[in-house]
Image (tube, rainbow, N blue to C red):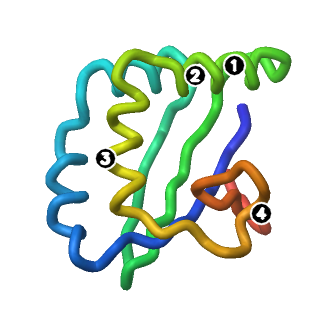
Amino acid sequence: MRRFGQTIRLRPEVVAEYKRIHVKIWPEIEDAIRESGIRNYSIYLKDGIMFAYMEYHGPDDEFEARMEALSNAPRMQEWWEITKAMQIPLDTRADGEWWADMEEVFHQE
């Protein structure tokens, strides 16, 4: 199992709408996330900063292919078109990232 933390900013004028659309995400998106091996996926918001936590449960050698399949899942591009317009990525994110990956500095089971 691999853990991930990511961060991005949220445009202040869309906070209510962002929360509204995440009350119940589209079933196709929910299914694609589950099929990709992502579990325990949460998004937190504080002062315009979002933090996402997720766990990948699956073989390491399948991770890239599963994430590619997730990005190509039905309606995923449509969902991202909606949500990306609401987000402000960090200037310090790595090339190719939208949400910036965070370094895990502590974990306790």
65, 44: nearer the viewer: 65
Q: Residues within 10 Å of mark 4 (few under 14, many from 20)?
A: few
CA separation, marks 1 and 2?
A: 6 Å
Residue drawn at 51 percent across, 32 percent down:
39
Left or right: 15, with 49 as reference point: left
**Residue type pointed to by label 1:** Gly
CA separation, marks 3 and 4?
A: 27 Å
Residue 101 - label: none
Residue drawn at 51 percent across, 56 percent down:
52
In front: label 3 or label 4: 3
Report if the CB atoms under discs 1 and 2 are less than 8 Å apart. Answer: yes
In front: label 2 or label 3: 3
Q: Which residue is mark 1?
A: 58
Residue drawn at 24 percent across, 58 percent down:
18
Q: Which residue is mark 3?
A: 82
Q: Secondary structure at mark 2?
A: loop
Q: Position of residue 77 (x, y in %)?
A: 42, 31
Q: Name which of mark 1 and mark 4 comes first in the sequence.
A: 1
103, 73: nearer the viewer: 73
**Residue type pointed to by label 4:** Glu
Report if the CB atoms under discs 1 and 4 are less than 8 Å apart. Answer: no
Q: Tell me if residue 68 comes above or below residue 98 in the rendering.
A: above
Q: Tell me if residue 95 comes above or below residue 73 in the rendering.
A: below
Q: Which residue is mark 2?
A: 37
Q: Which residue is mark 4?
A: 103
Report if the CB atoms under discs 1 and 3 are less than 8 Å apart. Answer: no
Q: Position of residue 65 (x, y in %)?
A: 72, 17
Q: Position of residue 72 (x, y in %)?
A: 52, 20
